[in-house]
Image (cartoon, coloured by chain):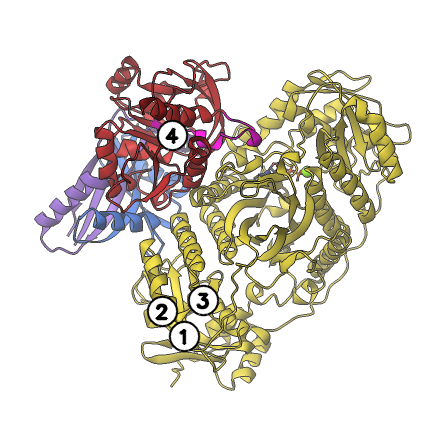
Chain colours: A yellow, B red, C purple, D blue
Amino acid sequence: MIPNEPKISPELVAEHGLTPEEYQRILTLIGREPTLTELGIFSAMWNEHCSYKSSKVHLRTLPTEAPWVIQGPGENAGVISIGDGLAVVFKMESHNHPSYIEPYQGAATGVGGILRDVFTMGARPIACLNSLRFGDPAHPKTRHLVAGVVAGIGGYGNSFGVPTVGGSVGFHTRYDGNCLVNAMAVGLAEEDKIFYAKATGVGHPIVYLGSKTGRDGIHGATMASAEFGAGTEEKRPTVQVGDPFSEKLLLEACLEIMAAGCVIAIQDMGAAGLTCSAVEMGAKGDLGVTLDLDKVPVRETGMTAYEMMLSESQERMLMVLRPEKEAEAEAIFRKWGLDFAVVGETTDTKRFVVRWQGESVADLPIKELGDEAPVYQRPFTQTPKPPRVNPKEIKHPLKISEALEQMIALPDLCSKRWVWEQYDHVILGNTFQRPGGDAAVLRVNDGPKGLALTTDVTPRYCEADPFEGGKQAVAEAWRNLAAVGARPLAVTDNLNFGNPERPEIMGQFVGAIHGIAQACKALDFPVVSGNVSLYNETNGRAILPTPTIGGVGVLDDFTKSASLAFKAAEEIILLIGETQGWLGQSLYLRDVCGREEGAPPPVDLAAERRNGDLVRALIGEGIATAVHDISDGGLMVALAEMAMASGIGARLYAAPIAVEPHAFWFGEDQARYVVTVRAADAEATIARAKAAGVPVRRVGSTAGNALTLPGEAPILLKQLRDRFEGWLPAYMAGEVI
Amino acid sequence: MRAAVVVFPGINRERDMARALTLIAGRAPTMVWHADTALPEGTDLVVLPGGFSYGDYLRCGAIASRAPIMEAVRDHAEKGGLVLGVCNGFQILCEAGLLPGALLRNAGLKFICRDVHLRVERSDTPFTRGYNAGQVIRVPTAHGEGNYFASPETLAELEAEGRVLFRYTDAEGQVAERANVNGASNAIAGVLSQKHNVLGLMPHPENHVETIMGSTDGRGLFAGLVDHFVQAA
Amino acid sequence: MKARVTVTLKPGVLDPQGKAIEGALKSLGVTGVASVRQGKVFDIEIDSVDAARAEAALKAAADKLLANVIIENYQVEVLR
Amino acid sequence: MKARVTVTLKPGVLDPQGKAIEGALKSLGVTGVASVRQGKVFDIEIDSVDAARAEAALKAAADKLLANVIIENYQVEVLR
Ligand SMILES: Nc1ncnc2c1ncn2[C@@H]1O[C@H](COP(=O)(O)OP(=O)(O)O)[C@@H](O)[C@H]1O
Ligand SMILES: [Mg+2]
């Protein structure tokens, strides 16, 4: 009954990314040789992306629970409660490889995919963020990738109609052959109206919705499809093209049929399309699924079962509908001009049966497809701890002001306005703090509740010490939320690493997860969703380990958030947190002194919490007038950013005697903030910090239109701003490097 | 003021527009579906909101301008009724021939989202009676194709007839190349139809209407319209 | 039957994209390019077998939708 | 010398624009259109008088800039 053409050869198995052992496991599981379609289904379900086979055992160590967590990892997106019956649904996902191949479409479909994950759960998307890493600016491909990726992210989000409110952009030669595109989407729903993938009920219609299926993204299987395809047609590109217009229609149609009570279960078709979504819906509900591929809307002729099962065409959904509501749901979809087709039904057999042209081309045990996927305890070696850098042994080639002027125009530190001005960040009318600050702040519905959103990671720290780097990424996300006055609630993560089959890389992965887990526990900042992207390497050279953290926090009153711009002259500038002058892995050491080395700053999680709690309280009480967390570039860069954002300068005191001046101004010690207060509040604030065990120090006062250090010529803000704003546009215009 | 906001597939600033209208007019607009053929009885103002109707595929606004509801919008305009098109709405009005000219790709070839300054050229129209002539307002833009183009003759006519209602300027109200975000001819941000009853405007006043969100410079447009209908009644 | 409608900008209409491409070609070392104007093509599959009718349908399509005659010209070719 | 570079999507690559145009033509009552695929044309003015050299330069331009060869095909015609 099941055709066995062609014979499965070892080459075909390898072509599908399955090892001989994994193939053996398939044979044992089903007791016969699989059909080609079945092999394709297994390869999709058991690849790294779907099965998390290398990462699963470690991901389990992440804390995922808190009283406000409604849904942790395992669904399309994480869900947390923000009170008043409202839920925030969010997730981050990578589209690294596709973006390297075709930057515009790769990035665009990355945004499309993550948006779908969010509205599949019944939430209306309210914001997007993105974290981007590119190679050395001097590398010949970098400019092209930056231009395409940014245009693609904007092209999709702007058209879909969601504000893109934040993110980060970094450059390093280790991303030369592998750029990173991590996109995060955030949606809002009512707590009791969340939709899940779990199917219930036997004999219910399974409905296909959205765009038609084409031969998009059928990779790893080029050989097989060449043997089976129409033959004469030229080799097909595996690039998927995004259609934000269809996705916008899909959003509106989905929310409408959800509101109409038509939906039992819903799952978007992401990677491995129809296969993953159908198997997940059935397996989660302990049901079987039968699909009839002749009913699948296709946009190309001659598509085989194999191709339909593996297509990654975008803007598609699978649902289990209430049978009595089928006609109503169909009318809604037709109104929005979208395809609607009943392509199967739920069964009580726990088997995944696929029929095509009157034949059964797959008949597999549905639970085992997921549950029996291989899980690996890959061997790993711990990254050796690098030595601590002694600031006294670092020569300082430049004056502080000169170093600042140089640093502020560095690719990693300069203004990313060129990027975020290509994103509509004001649509929906709720963006209270736009890109350019520590975290974006959005009004929730009509307020006064607000949300704070950020993405963070410092890959050079992770490379030097994955454990401290993992901690630091979480701590910085938490700190960025605290710096606007928000209560940090939960994170999504996107773990980008090289080849896990290399023990050093696996060691980075394990170290980073360990650090993330420890920080999330200590800060009550659980992980509710995430994504793993491995094998980011070219010719044996891996990317810097990059565990991106997307953080979400809540404000009771968004108007009481703080921003980084100085607010008035003659206010007192306070440095919150302890400054030892940590130069290891600092940008100053790397880019001014030319030494990329040393241990990264250690993260004291108790201090993070103490200092952040104080800052948040000062913001809430209206005492802190401007706040900025201190990260890349240290105190001096933070001060410069606050000054440039406002046009108000600062008169600064000398560094304390105990710390080398360059280490004081440019060291990257963690758990620190710059806070300004009115002169009348200074004494009380200092006393309060001391009482709370929080180190605090006056570093100067706001004044004039320049930054002035004792014994150095004033740095005019205008000049600084020209450098800060100038580099990226000049680079993209081909005028520098 | 009874406002009707037309919803085309792919439009995405209709909620922003409805919120602004509700806030300022004290009455929610009726949302009208593109496939309908009539406007609600007694519609005072028709609004074509911003977004990406039909994904901006083919040309911005082209497909929407041929939608069934557009006949009713045209009728409304021909009878002297007020029509406001913002961003994609402006593009639709040009494509429909209700306004002259066309909106081309931004001169910098990139989508631009930033606050811009606009000079209100005259205050004796229903759309600008909430402002003073020469007043400079700050509102956001968010578009990739807002570069207003018309033939030299048309431009001369628009200028001579005082139909350029908003112009991109610097904060002081001076026309300057740097302030012309998209390279529009004569720095045109908004134009009127011959009868002064149809306005196309590229930036988004509807996103700057609440003190609490940091700026109310866009309010004047809607407040002026409300006032116009109060006076008329 | 296959047909192609080609839509080009009228002379005198600004073409920022064409301009940008001119510049980019220069910096790529493609020499001798005096000007670039960008347009669109629509490759259309028609059910009809009658070339004259097909052409009429295509003209209608171009007039009604494919071209904005304020700024664009168009040309219709029925290929086979 | 004048030349035209025509850039079209490879078969099988999704063309959301073409799809939307198809739908719009139908609702405008233009009948008989089975499918639409949208592409680009670049009308290029070249200083060179040597057709072979011009063609080589344009091929280079198309490869490097005018076409995205991952998803698009192109065709170069030197007209005169
Ligand atoms: N890709 C991007 N998309 C949107 N906003 C961005 C992007 N990159 C940077 N930004 C914005 O620029 C500002 C500075 O970024 P960054 O230096 O990474 O901040 P921080 O160090 O405080 O996390 C932030 O407001 C950030 O949201
Ligand atoms: Mg920050």
Q: Is residue A592 left or right of residue D39?
A: right
Q: Is residue A595 left or right of residue A532?
A: right
- Of mark 1 and mark 3, the one earlier in the sequence is 3
Ligand 1 shown in quarter: top right
The verdict on a common chain for dots 1 and 3 is: yes
Q: CA distance from mark 2 to mark 3?
A: 27 Å
Q: CA distance from mark 1 to mark 4?
A: 49 Å
Q: Which residue is mark 2?
A: A342
Please say whether residue C37 is one of the residues in the magenta stretch.
no
Q: Depth check: give the residue in front, B40 or B189.
A: B40
Q: Which residue is mark 4?
A: B146
Q: Which residue is mark 1?
A: A345
Label 4 SS: loop
Percent coordinates x, y for residue B181 in the rendering: 44, 25
- Of mark 2 and mark 3, the one earlier in the sequence is 3
The verdict on a common chain for dots 3 and 4 is: no
Q: Alpha-carbon neighbours of circle 2 within 10 Å: few (<14), some, or many (≥20)?
A: many
Judged by depth in the image, the label closer to the viewer, 1 or 4, is 1
Judged by depth in the image, the label closer to the viewer, 1 or 3, is 1
Q: Depth check: give the residue in front, D38 or A480.
A: A480
Magenta-drawn segment? B200-216
Q: Amino acid at mark 4?
A: Gly
Q: Which residue is mark 3?
A: A221
Q: Chain of mark 3?
A: A
Percent coordinates x, y for residue C40 in the rendering: 28, 40
Q: In the picture shown, does residue A364 fall above or below A47?
A: below
